[in-house]
Image (cartoon, helix red, strand yellow):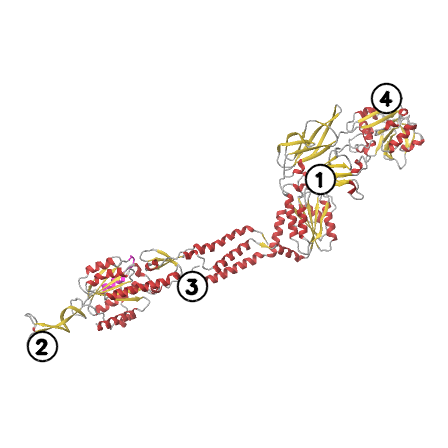
């Protein structure tokens, strides 16, 4: 009897991870536009249970929405308006440039990114959000339009990614900005090997559309602590350039630079109200996602 | 400290390898992939780090390890160590026989021989004693048994090549006697020579005991090229009262290659007279004749010089020419028959070396003045000179003159003068009847008949003797010849410094026919030469000959000899018992001056040349010599370089320092590995 093959990409939806984050929600921080009711605030008034405001009755309004108690006090017809709850599009923007295939130990960054993207897509799909995927390097590689039925396609696409080209944020992100017409949640997963200003410039157009932008900065522990000992030729996975490196001599400076880079990104993203999270591939993904989502929920309540 | 194979020190260049690795090594070829080097690129790359030696201890360890290994391969040994190693077998008595004969002057033979001798000395232990013996024809203890190596080396350094011939016998005998006297058990002889075959006849009575060893160091060169002037001959001719000499130089080419157009120069009294060119085939002889020259006086010094080669000493031949003096003699006959001395005078007129000046007279006319400047008086079948003539003759003989008495029927001696006569003269023996008599016995040991000694050198039996005078000799007289019947044919008696010989038959055609026989002329010449005590003037001597100056002296005054090297030797200083004896040890011209002689007087010159045998460099196999001397071939009798190497090899082998060095080198490498690993755990850089 033929054994049933698991679905390609299904491995990215790890039950262990989901068990940890399954009771969390990924809610759009901004209002998003969806077609059906969902968990997110829509830009419009709708039929949710959240009261928004009163407005004067005009002909054509559904008389069921007339606030009779207010009519009794004011003798005027007011209609109660409720905030619309909607679903949204969750697009995972996954950097599949060559640098993402790096792995010093454990899983490569691209794998880690796929896990993150898949888990979030799963969460979104579970809350009836539409999920899509755009993989990019120095251009857009694959595009899975957001759809309620595209979760499997997203997983398939994630399974097929091959990080074999150099990356560049500006070009593909600008193209994406032109593409996204509807406000949604954009999950950008990359290692951000560009200047912070350049990154921000590349991302800004996405933000301008009103999208809720969640940025995951995936880094291998080796990229953070540069824990090399041997003097070797280091090859830049992006450019193929090789440089003789004596780790001992530059590890201190490197660590300072990468921390400065992360710090700069943190600052700049927070300035633009962009969620920015550094994911260390050495950390268990469930813990990382859990802490992120929990924090996001807390922040949402505060707002 | 010395090294057997110092070429391996080229391996020290490998020390540069770790230095270069330190300095120019690029980081390991292993490529580490990294997502982006954008940060790394911003950090200034410290390329200087590559050029800076970071771990000096490690570098020094590596360099030391390589140096030790290179030194191990160079196979070092300590000279002191070699000495110590040799001392294991106990102290040694060493006799170094260093050949300093003239042939050692060939090329670099002498330098190599000195090196070999020094090597032997340096390999001595503190307990060893060595004797340095320089030998040529004779052996001489140059440095008596001593353990002082510096003195021995100084003696070797100051030793020079002599002009002597090579004789191994005396040297080996001296070595054997030194070793026999030595109380030390280990006795060694090291013979350093070019091993000329001419120096070993095989009949030397030298035998080393079993406890003595003979090691040889041969400095002989293969394919020696040597041209020599072994002899010079002179043809004398009289011309208008002066003597003219034609010099013919003999040339001998001992080499394997023919010599062409070799210049041969004749120098007389320091002036180059003539240069001829000669071709001499390989292993062949030739000659060059120069044009005649007139001999102007006594002691004319001449030199023939031929070509150039690695042994220049034998390219030179010295000689001294003196006009030959004729032998003056007076023939006294009875005067009755004018032809009785015809045979004699005719025979004596032929001689050239020497020339004979013959004067014929009768006994009655013989005066004491007739003996002046005479060498020989021949009484040819005549009575003894009467009165003053007789006594003058007696004095003449006693002073060294020669008297030949030819007995015949007219010979008669007064009883008072019989002491001049060798024997008692008797009557006439007639052999006319039957078979005539002949000469049956000749004393070939006597100088007169010596020249006839060789076979076919004169047939005296062909001469018929019909009559002779009987002679009774006493043991004091020496019988020189006898007739076939045993009667004395010739006898000799020494009288004072002179000689008296009697021939008991006539030397004409009256009693014998010897006058027409071939032996007549040489017999007469030999008799006269002997009686005149004539010695052919020697134009040159050979190194090693001993000269009796007293015999050559014309006065009793002290004589001073100036050697070719300029040393002045007084005759009186030659030592008791050796007065007048001069050993000719140097090649060249000796000058003999009479003390007090005027400076203008030309001194007597003695030309001395090398022994011609020295020119023959053909070597004997040292093993042959060792086998002859020790009774068994020594395993150490090898060529000099090999011997030297063997000695060095032995020393190196005994010490085996290379083993320790190699171990130390490997140990250092192991330490280096450990340290390098330890360091590389931190950086893995080196």
Disc 1 target residue: B566
Q: Is residue A24 visible?
A: no
Give me the C-alpha separation between circle 4 and circle 3: 132 Å
A67 within the magenta span = no
Name above or below for residue B628 compared with residue A206. above
Q: Alpha-carbon distance for marks 1 and 3?
A: 83 Å
Q: Which residues are magenta?
A: A152-166
Residue, disc 4: B339
Disc 3 versus disc 2: nearer the observer: 2
What crowding class fits label 2: few (fewer than 14 Cα within 10 Å), some (14-19), or many (20 or more)?
some
Q: Position of residue B176 (x, y in %)?
A: 73, 50
Camera-nearest label, 1 or 3: 1
Disc 3 to disc 2, how far (Cα)?
Answer: 79 Å
Residue A207 in which image quadrant: bottom left
Q: Is residue B251 above or below residue A245?
A: above
Q: Quadrant of residue B503?
A: top right
The residue carrying mark 2 is A70
């Amino acid at each position: 009897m033929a054994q049933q093959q698991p679905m390609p990409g299904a491995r990215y939806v790890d039950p262990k991870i989901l068990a940890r984050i399954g009771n969390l929600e990924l809610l759009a921080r901004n209002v998003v536009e969806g077609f059906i009711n969902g968990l997110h605030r829509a830009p419009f008034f709708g039929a949710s249970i959240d009261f928004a405001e009163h407005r004067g009755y005009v002909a054509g309004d559904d008389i069921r929405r007339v606030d009779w108690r207010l009519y009794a006090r004011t003798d005027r017809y007011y209609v109660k308006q409720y905030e619309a709850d909607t679903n949204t599009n969750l697009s995972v923007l996954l950097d599949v440039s060559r640098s993402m295939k790096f792995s010093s130990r454990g899983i490569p960054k691209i794998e880690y990114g796929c896990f993150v993207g898949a888990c979030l897509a799963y969460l979104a799909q579970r809350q009836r959000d539409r999920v899509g995927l755009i993989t990019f390097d120095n251009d857009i590689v694959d595009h899975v339009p957001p759809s309620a039925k595209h979760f499997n396609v997203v997983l398939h696409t994630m399974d097929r990614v091959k990080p074999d080209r150099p990356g560049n944020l500006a070009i593909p992100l600008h193209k994406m900005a032109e593409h996204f017409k509807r406000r949604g949640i954009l999950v950008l997963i990359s290692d951000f090997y560009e200047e912070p200003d350049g990154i921000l410039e590349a991302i800004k157009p996405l933000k301008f559309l009103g999208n809720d932008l969640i940025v995951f900065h995936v880094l291998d522990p080796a990229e953070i602590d540069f824990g090399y000992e041997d003097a070797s030729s280091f090859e830049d996975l992006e450019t193929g350039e090789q440089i003789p490196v004596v780790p001992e001599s530059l590890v201190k400076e490197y660590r300072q630079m990468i921390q400065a880079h992360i710090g700069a990104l943190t600052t700049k993203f927070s300035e633009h109200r962009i969620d920015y999270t550094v994911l260390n591939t050495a950390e268990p993904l469930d813990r990382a996602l859990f802490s992120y989502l929990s924090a996001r929920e807390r922040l949402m309540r505060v707002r | 400290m010395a090294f057997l194979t110092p070429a391996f020190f080229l391996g020290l260049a490998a020390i540069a390898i770790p230095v270069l690795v330190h300095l120019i090594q690029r980081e390991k070829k292993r490529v580490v992939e990294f997502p982006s080097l954008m940060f790394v690129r911003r950090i200034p790359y410290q390329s200087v780090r590559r050029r800076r030696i970071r771990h000096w201890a490690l570098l020094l360890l590596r360099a030391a390890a390589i140096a030790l290994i290179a030194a191990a391969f160079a196979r070092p040994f300590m000279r002191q160590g070699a000495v110590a190693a040799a001392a294991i077998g106990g102290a040694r008595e060493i006799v170094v026989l260093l050949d300093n004969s003239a042939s050692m002057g060939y090329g670099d033979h002498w330098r190599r021989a000195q090196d070999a001798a020094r090597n032997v000395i340096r390999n001595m232990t503190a307990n060893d004693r060595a004797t340095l013996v320089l030998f040529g024809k004779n052996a001489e203890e140059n440095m008596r048994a001593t353990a002082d190596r510096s003195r021995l080396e100084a003696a070797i350094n100051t030793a020079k090549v002599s002009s002597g011939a090579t004789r191994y016998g005396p040297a080996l005998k001296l070595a054997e006697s030194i070793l026999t006297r030595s109380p030390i058990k280990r006795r060694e002889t090291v013979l350093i020579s070019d091993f000329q075959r001419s120096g070993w006849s095989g009949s030397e009575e030298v035998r080393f005991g079993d406890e003595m060893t003979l090691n040889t160091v041969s400095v002989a060169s293969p394919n020696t090229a040597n041209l020599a002037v072994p002899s010079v001959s002179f043809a004398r001719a009289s011309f208008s009262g002066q003597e003219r000499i034609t010099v013919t130089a003999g040339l001998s080419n001992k080499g394997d290659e023919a010599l062409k157009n070799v210049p041969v120069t004749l120098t007389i009294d320091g002036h180059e007279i003539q240069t001829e060119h000669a071709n001499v085939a390989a292993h062949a002889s030739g000659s060059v004749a120069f044009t005649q020259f007139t001999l102007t006086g006594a002691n004319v010094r001449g030199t023939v010089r031929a070509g150039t080669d690695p042994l220049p000493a034998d390219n030179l031949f010295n000689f001294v020419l003196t006009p030959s003096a004729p032998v003056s003699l007076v023939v006294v006959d009875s005067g009755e028959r004018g032809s009785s001395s015809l045979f004699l005078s005719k025979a004596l007129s032929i001689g050239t070396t020497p020339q004979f000046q013959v004067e014929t007279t009768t006994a009655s006319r013989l005066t004491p003045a007739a003996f002046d400047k005479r060498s020989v008086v021949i009484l040819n079948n005549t009575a003894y000179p009467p009165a003053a003539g007789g006594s003058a003759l007696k004095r003449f003989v006693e002073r060294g003159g020669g008297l030949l008495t030819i007995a015949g029927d007219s010979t008669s001696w007064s009883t008072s003068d019989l002491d001049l006569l060798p024997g008692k003269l008797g009557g006439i023996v007639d052999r006319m009847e039957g078979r005539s008599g002949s000469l049956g016995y000749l004393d070939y040991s006597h100088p007169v008949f010596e020249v006839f000694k060789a076979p076919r050198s004169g047939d005296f039996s062909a001469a018929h003797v019909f009559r002779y005078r009987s002679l009774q000799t006493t043991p004091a007289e020496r019988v020189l010849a006898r007739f076939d019947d045993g009667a004395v044919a010739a006898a000799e008696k020494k009288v004072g410094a002179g000689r008296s010989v009697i021939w008991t038959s006539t030397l004409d055609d009256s009693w014998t026919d010897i006058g027409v026989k071939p032996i007549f002329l040489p017999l007469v010449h030999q008799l006269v030469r002997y009686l005149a005590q004539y010695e052919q003037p020697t134009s040159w001597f050979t190194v090693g000959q001993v000269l009796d100056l007293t015999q050559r002296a014309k006065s009793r005054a002290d004589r001073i000899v100036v050697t070719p090297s300029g040393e002045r030797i007084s005759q009186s200083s030659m030592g008791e018992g050796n007065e007048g004896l001069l050993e000719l040890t140097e090649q060249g011209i000796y000058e003999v001056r009479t003390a007090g002689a005027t400076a203008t007087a030309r001194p007597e010159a003695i030309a001395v040349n090398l022994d011609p045998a020295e020119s023959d460099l053909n070597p004997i196999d040292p093993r042959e010599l060792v086998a002859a001397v020790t009774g068994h071939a020594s395993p150490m009798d090898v060529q000099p370089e090999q011997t030297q190497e063997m000695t060095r090899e032995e020393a190196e082998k005994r010490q085996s320092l290379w083993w320790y060095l190699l171990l130390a080198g490997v140990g250092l490498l192991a330490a280096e590995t450990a340290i390098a690993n330890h360091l590389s755990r931190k950086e893995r850089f080196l």
